[in-house]
Amino acid sequence: MKSIIWKVQIKNAPAVARYCKRCGAVTQFASTGLFRVNAQQKNLDIWLVYRCTTCDSTWNLTVLSRVSSRSIPAEMLRGFSDNDLILAKRYAADTSLLKRNGAEPGQPEVEIIGEAVVASDYPLRIHLVSELSLELKASAVLRKKLDLSRKEFDRMIESGKLICTSGHDLKKCKLAGEIIVETVR
C-alpha cells in the first residue's frame, strides 16, 4: 500500500464578519498581519489588528490580555514584536479565538501540498495533516484532491472503499491535526 502525506496550509488569513461602528453594519474585516503589543507595568496586552474592507476602520482582536512577559516564550514574544506573518496567520485562522472576540470566521483559502493521485496508485494510505484547526471539512479536501463528486465520495465510504483509520467521521469532521484515510479500488 502506497503511503502519501497531504499537508493543508492556509494561503491567506480568512476575512471575518463583525459589526463595524463606523459603517453601522456587519462588514468584513481583513487581518493586516500586524500585532499591537502594549505593556502595562509587568503585564502585556497583545492584539492582532484587523481593518474593515469597506471603510478602513480598525479592530483589535485580543490575542493575550494582561499576561506576564515571562509567561510568553521568548521566540513567540519576538514574533509578536516583529509582526511574524506565520504567527499572524495562525491566530487569524483560530476560529475559537475569533468567536470569543465576537467575530464570525470566514472560510480560509487553503493549499494542499503533496503528490497527485492517479488510479494506478490505489490502494493508498493518505495522511491528511493540518497544523491549524480549520472550519473546513476534511471531506471537501479529500474530494478535491481525489477528484471525486460528493455522490462518488459518499458511495466509496458506504461501500468500504474509503476508510478512516484514525477514527474520524469523514463526512462530518473538520481539519485539525492528522486524519488517516485508506482507499481500496
Image (cartoon, helix red, strand yellow):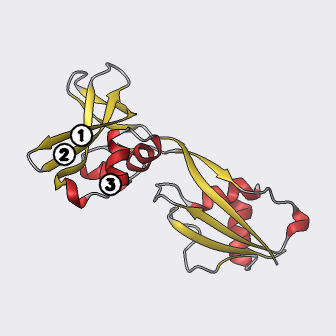
**Mark 1 residue type:** Val
Residue identifier under label 2: 45
Residues at discs 1 and 3 in contact (Cβ within 8 Å): no
The location of residue 168, given as percent across then percent down, is: 55, 75
Q: Which three-letter amino acid code belongs to the residue tagged 2?
A: Asp
Going by the image, does 178 lie left or right of 50?
right
Q: Could you say which is closer to the camera, residue 91 or residue 155?
A: 91
Amino acid type, label 3: Ala
**For the residue labelled by badge 1, is the local secondary structure a helix, a strand or a loop?**
strand
The disc placed on residue 37 is 1
Q: Look at mark 3 in the image and give the residue it sits on.
A: 74
Residue 158 % position (x, y): 69, 76
Closer-to-camera residue (176/34): 34
Q: Residue at x 22, y 21 (%)?
A: 22
Q: What SS does tag 3 mark?
A: helix
- Determine the residue positioned at 37% across, 31% down: 28
Q: Secondary structure at mark 2?
A: strand
Mark 3 packing: few (<14 Cα in 10 Å), some, or many (20+)?
A: few
**Left-right relation of 35 to 171:** left
Distance between the alpha carbons at the discs numbered 3 and 2: 15 Å
- Earlier along the polypeptide chain: callout 1 or callout 3? 1
Label 2 crowding class (10 Å Cα cut-off): few <14, some 14-19, many 20+?
some
Q: Where does the image place residue 53, in percent across and percent down from the top left? A: 38, 24
